[in-house]
Image (spheres, rainbow, N blue to C red):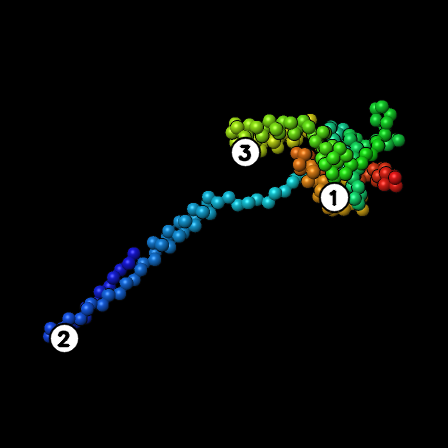
Amino acid sequence: MAEIAEGGGGGHGKGKKRAKKSSTRVDMTPMVDLAFLLLTFFVLTSTFSKPKMLPLAYPAKVDKDIDVKGPKMNNGITFLLSEDRIFYYQGEYYNKDHRADDGSVTELKEVDFGTGEKGIRKLLGKLNNYVLVKKQGLDEKLKRKQLNDSTYLKKLDGLRVETKALKVLIKTDKEALCKNFIDLVDELKIAEIGVIAPVDITPGELQLMKEKLKK
């Protein structure tokens, strides 16, 4: 709001009239109030970007003096990393003292980070096909607006941890590269793996991997 203050200029001389002097003063109080209202509006309606992180499940530490036999791994795979090579085996680890029901022991297989037939992406896509197919159905419903974003994410999170979904253990030796660990986690994220647990490598697994590295 502007105010005009008028000041009279008296004419002492006869027949002479001086122009009245005027001064303007702008009241900025309404503008300040409006600025704060707009600032409050934008703060309350803005969506701040959240850091994107992949949650990892770390198992609890167990006293080595206590013999704890947990449940068998259901639909699980274990990756062993060493320098620039990656091996895996499915299910539980079996050695000569602890064999599978058919009498077999664990045999490591090797994959690479490529997208070909021997690549890890092809392997994960095959083993986690149950989740990927179900996800396609959710994507179609989201596209047709049969699901909102929050419901879609909730159903997808539940799908990733179902019994039929693939579970992954990651184990490394002292020669493993951090880059390869990150690349593996990225591939697991692409394959919609929901349960990922980095755990310590056992002496038996380490020996088995060393034998593979010699070949």
Q: CA distance from mark 2 to mark 1?
A: 96 Å
Q: Above or below — where is 152 with respect to 172?
A: above
Amino acid bearing label 3:
Ser
Could you tell me which residue is drawn at 79 percent across and 44 percent down?
A: 84
Residues packed near mark 3 inside 10 Å, few (<14), some (14 to 19) or many (20 plus)? few
Dividing the image into 4 quarters, which one contains the N terminus?
bottom left
Could you tell me which residue is drawn at 63 percent across and 27 percent down?
A: 134
Residue 107 as seen in the image, left or right of residue 43: right
Q: Above or below — where is 7 with respect to 89?
A: below
Camera-side residue: 111 or 128?
111
Camera-side residue: 55 or 14?
14
Upstream in sequence: badge 2 or badge 1: 2
Q: CA distance from mark 3 to mark 1?
A: 33 Å
Could you tell me which residue is drawn at 43 percent across and 46 percent down?
A: 41
Residue position marked by numbered label 3 in the rendering: 150
Dividing the image into 4 quarters, which one contains the C terminus?
top right
Q: Does residue 168 appear in this view?
A: no
**The disc label shown at residue 18, or none:** none
**The disc label shown at residue 180, or none:** 1
User: Do the CB atoms of the residues marked 2 and 1 lie less than 8 Å apart?
Assistant: no
The quarter of the picture where residue 127 lies is: top right
Residue 74, position as x, y percentages in the image = 73, 28
Amino acid bearing label 1:
Asn
Amino acid bearing label 2:
His
In this view, which residue lies farthest toward the top? Answer: 102
Residues packed near mark 1 inside 10 Å, few (<14), some (14 to 19) or many (20 plus)? some
Upstream in sequence: badge 2 or badge 3: 2
Q: Does residue 183 appear in this view?
A: yes
**The disc label shown at residue 12, or none:** 2
Which secondary structure, mark 2?
A: loop
Which secondary structure, mark 1?
A: helix
User: Do the CB atoms of the residues marked 3 and 1 lie less than 8 Å apart?
Assistant: no
